[in-house]
Image (cartoon, grey):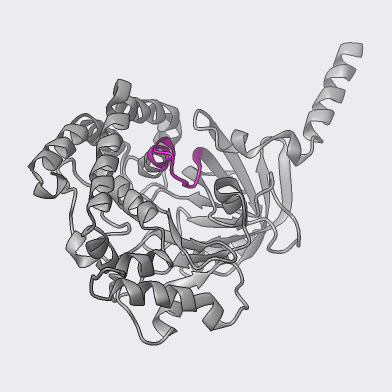
Amino acid sequence: MRIVALTLALASFVAALPAHAQSTDDLFDPATLHEIRLNVNRRDLPLLREHYLENTYYTADFTWRNVRVRNVGIRSRGVASRSSSKLALRVDFNRFASGQDFLGLKSLVLDNLWQDGSMLHEALSMALFARMGQAAPRTSFARLYINNEYQGLYAIVESVDKSFLTRTTGENEGYLFSYQLQQQPFYGEAFEEPGPYKILFEPQTHEREADSTLYGPIQSLFREANQPLDAVWRDRVERYVDLTQFVTQVAIESFLAESDGLIGVTGMNNFYLYRPGGSDKHRFFPWDKDSAFLIAEFGVQERFEDNVLLRQALQYSDLRELFFETLRRACDLAAEENWLENEIVRLAALVEPAVTQDTRKPFTTEAFFESIDVLRDFARRRPTIVREQIARNPMAR
């Protein structure tokens, strides 16, 4: 009887552990297949599915391990990834409860992995960014249940917000913007009025400040970038953007054969823009890598002439050298002890049971395995192909 009582007491103690008994390191552990449960009012869930193209928030209770957060806000999210059957979700822990958080996080994304047959592009891409020493959102995988019904495999993605800024930059008082894709592609053109920038760059902090404060430095960035190259072009532009960081991110996305990133088929896309408080200099953060790993033969300078900022920056020999050196380093780190292929194999084995049972995914389980084979082929061949492209490129000499 004493053993039973002790066991029950221990179970009660574990169930009552506060959120800080776990950490974000646990949540974003890449070796763990997590389980997340959302309890949603039965009247709200049909509305959420019916209005999945809208950003309407609904209340839910969120549970991970022994941590339960009540009255969180959930809404549909994404662009082409939105689905009524397998909902793509944003979770705001403080939407309906001011000051509430989860492991210190104010929000996170539950990515439905709708556009990626392998379901691994996001995690692999962000892992390479981190391996390259670059700031990028953390990811992990989870089985998601809504009202105890299995929804399939999801990626847990760290939101780019103040918590992310603190972790990656050591401060969070600056101006953060989420890029908003438009029908008319944006290639870094200059606009005389701030209006277009207000549409393209949605503020995530300091939302109530004057347009001149929010968008003036962005307008200056692209105005200066579009000026003719001269002896002071770089000095003027680098007041408003970290060109070294920009070129580095472009190079990593180029290695990843990213077709919808900073230099994408639809112009600039899938990034956050940030400038610290008291500074006019911006930097970029990567986001949403479902469209990476397009083909192993992807050109390392695909569409580079389209983007004003990159085209001008690569006229400088040290930035060209940085671009190609970053590509070489990506090749080395991907190929080192077969790191990239081993990550593909490891993650595929981790998620396979959840994928097999995922009846809401928009492709077959056989297609999942085929996509994994394609990814492994990419990992084997991409470093060699990139090195060959560099060797043939006169700009790399």
In this orientation, does residue 265 appear? no
Q: Is residue 130 magenta?
A: yes
Q: Is residue 355 magenta?
A: no
Query: As drawn, is 30 to the left or to the right of 310?
Result: right
Query: As drawn, is 315 to the left or to the right of 191?
Result: left
Q: Position of residue 281 (x, y in %)?
A: 47, 64
Q: Position of residue 317 (x, y in %)?
A: 22, 52
Residue drawn at (27%, 27%), measured in percent from left and top?
335
Task: Determine whether 11 is above or below 203 in the image.
Answer: above
Q: Position of residue 356 (x, y in %)?
A: 40, 34
In this orientation, does residue 16 appear? yes
Query: As drawn, is 346 to the left or to the right of 187?
Result: right
Residue drawn at (28%, 44%), measured in percent from left and top?
256
Task: Determine whether 332 is above or below 188 in the image.
Answer: above
Residue drawn at (30%, 75%), measured in percent from left and top?
183
Residue drawn at (57%, 44%), measured in percent from left and top?
145
Farthest residue, direction bottom: 193
Question: Who is closer to the viewer here, 132 or 228?
Answer: 228
Q: Position of residue 202 (x, y in %)?
A: 49, 71
Q: Magenta stretch?
A: 126-141
